[in-house]
Image (cartoon, rainbow, N blue to C red):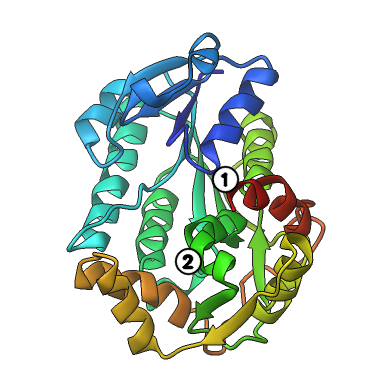
Amino acid sequence: MRIAVTTPMGNVGQHLTTMLIRAGVRPLLLARSPEKIPQAVLDYADVVKADSTDAQQVTAATRGVDAIYWVDPSAVSIDPLAAYAEATRAIVDAVTTNGIGRVVFQSSVGAEKRHGVGEIDGLAATEVALDALEVDVTHLRCGYFFTNLLLDVEAVRQGCLRTVLPRNLPLSWVAPRDIAEVAALTLLNPLWRGHRVQALHGPQHLSWNEVADILSNQIGHRVQVERISDNEMREQYLAAGMPAEMADAILGMSTGLRDDFHPEQQRTPVTTTPTTLASWINDELVPAL
């Protein structure tokens, strides 16, 4: 079986690539910047240059592919949902033109709402488009990535994280490596058929207050969480250089999951993954501090 992986050096893709290699698969890696892929990986994988928002490039790159792990690449854009629409067209064209029979799609908790969740609306549109095809599709609806904390390293150092969410609101948090493990098992499992949804909620739901306590215990100084207004958060995004439309799309991912949202799939052995936030902090965040 020929398996393609998009964003192979991403938070999930880098783990998925090596897992497939260890399983005896020589994956086809679709990369916008192939030169960034380590030589150790290149010895066991095939690489083709392809931008996941370019339908012609993706279709050309995936000829002969049986299954694909698809990620809609996020982009700094004045119209982020248009960029997601381009990625959706790219995977739909590739699947239909090349007869790709199986797709595992990296979606997000919140996509089940379909609208009103900022950038996640783009993922929801991809789900809908893939479900309109007569191929086998699994949507992995992932929780909040542990690795998002790496974007707030300076705030962690200073001991103050900011959020627009209620500090005691439980949310699913998940390690990207665990997502990769489920993706690899799904790609290699020949038994499933049809259109599937599998949420990945991590080992336990965590509030921001609980995240702050875990951080404090692991890194050796107190970390607190401050709840700020939506407008204050938007101004922070703008100050960081985001276009206004992008700031709204990023903010919308939080606000859309804030008010009376309940995931379509609850916590079960199927949706629970093993890596704890504490162990991830020790392994990946502490070295970055």
Q: How many labels does the image show?
A: 2
Q: How far apart are marks 1 and 2 (CA)?
A: 19 Å
Query: With respect to residue 208, does 250 lie above or below?
Result: above
In the image, residue 210 lies at what x, y percent? 73, 76
Assign a secondary structure to mark 2: helix
Q: Residue at x 65, y 84 (%)?
A: 169
Label 1: element kind? loop
| Residue 185 position by quadrant | top right
Residue beneath disc 2: 111
Q: Name the residue under label 1.
A: 194
Q: In this view, does 127 lie to the left or right of 12?
A: left
Q: How far from the left and from the top, in percent, is residue 174?
A: 66, 57
Residue ID at (35%, 23%):
34
Q: Is residue 62 visible?
A: no
Residue furthest top in the image:
43
**Residue lying furthest left in this view?**
78
On-image quarter of the N terminus: top right
Query: Residue 133 in the image: x percent, y percent?
Result: 40, 45
Q: Nearer the viewer, residue 223 or 262?
A: 223
Q: Nearer the viewer, residue 112 or 168?
A: 168
Q: Nearer the viewer, mark 1 or mark 2?
A: 2
Q: Which amino acid does label 1 sit on?
A: Gly
Q: Which of 147 and 144 is in front in this view?
A: 147
Asked if labels 2 and 1 touch by Cβ distance under 8 angstroms, the answer is: no
Label 1: few (<14), some (14–19) or many (≥20) C-alpha neighbours in 10 Å: few
Residue at x 72%, y 61% (from the top left corner): 219
Point 52% across, 69% down: residue = 155
Give the mark nearest the N terminus, 1 or 2: 2
Amino acid type of the residue tagged 2 in the rendering: Ala
Residue 120 seen in this snapshot = yes
Residue 74, horizontal then vertical, whole percent: 34, 52
